[in-house]
Image (cartoon, rainbow, N blue to C red):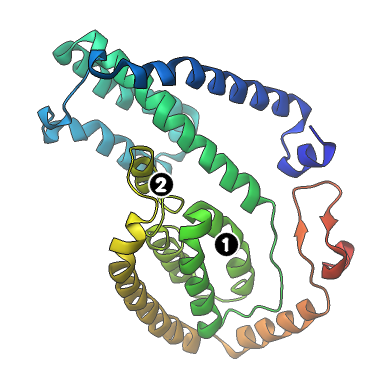
Amino acid sequence: MPKTLIGWTGIGWTGARRLLCCLLVAVALVAMTGGAAFAAGDGAPHFDGRELNLLWVIPFAGILLSIAILPLVAGDFWHHHFGKISAFWALAFLVPFAILFGYEIALYEIVYVGLLEYIPFIILLLSLFTVAGGVRVTGTLRGTPEMNTGILLLGTVIASWMGTTGAAMLLIRPILNANEHRQHKVHVIVFFIFLVANIGGSLTPLGDPPLFLGFLKGVSFFWPTTHMLAPMALVSVILLAVFYGLDRYFWAKEDEAVRTATARRSASKARSTSCCWPAWSPPYCSPVCGNPASA
């Protein structure tokens, strides 16, 4: 594996070997068992999901609420025991399921979902993190309502084609830097999450995990594009309009010193911009983008 790639990902040689071994094992397992699962056909264990009632959603809701709430109300506990909490909610589903519907069906569903849905999904996310996380976009960006709305619009448009993960990682640093000197900026990140990290990924399987799982199940790649374009555009336009009005309101409340500092910072950035991969050591930049030492 090239040394530059090791430095780019920041995982080191040991981490790279472990990651490579895990990927090889995953590919081998898929090759050995994935084909068998498909070939089994009518002879494979089968479970009709319509037999499950709403109570089976509780473990899923529990892990989502744990992820959303515990870091805020019990941060130390969550960071030390998040694995145990996740295992608890997983077992809260698996144990009753195995008891009620049988061990064979439970085991088959675990293997099927793990090998044919979970691993492809993780590989997709790993690719998006690796590619988008290695790109740094810098420039003369000011945190004005017009600039912020433009960044959100751009992120919403590209999220379906490079994934919400890729679009968010690509644009989060520019929008944070552009609004660095602003006092009222929390709403910017809230709408960034709404538009770039969620709604923007509605048009292709690359943009949204449930759509990707649907694609793995045989749904056409462009089915979301043809069926979701109008609703996605309507919601996006409404949210962008609301954001622009809200951002103009908060921009008017900013001190003149903050606006001046933002303008001065943009002018200084104009003299030193680069497009680097900051995770590499030392930084590798395109010659046309400037000197990384001055960025």
Q: Amino acid at mark 2?
A: Leu
Q: Is residue 21 above or below residue 217?
A: above
Relative to 3, 106 lies left or right: left
Nearer-the-camera pick, 231 or 96? 231
Task: Give the quadrant of the C terminus.
Answer: bottom right
The spot of residue 161 in percent (x, y) is: 50, 59
In the picture as drawn, the residue positioned furthest to the top comes out as: 103
State which tag comes first along the sequence, 1 or 2: 2
Nearer-the-camera pick, 90 or 49? 49
The spot of residue 160 in percent (x, y) is: 45, 59
Q: Is residue 76 visible?
A: no
Residue under the image location 58 percent in, 79 percent down: 143
The spot of residue 91 in percent (x, y) is: 30, 20
Q: Is residue 253 above or below residue 62?
A: below
1 or 2: mark nearer the eye: 1
Q: Amino acid at mark 1?
A: Ile
State how far apart marks 1 and 2 are (Cα).
22 Å
Nearer-the-camera pick, 245 or 34? 34
Residue holding disc 2: 72
Relative to 230, 158 lies left or right: right
The spot of residue 4 in percent (x, y) is: 82, 42
Residue under the image location 70 percent in, 27 percent down: 15
Residue holding disc 1: 172
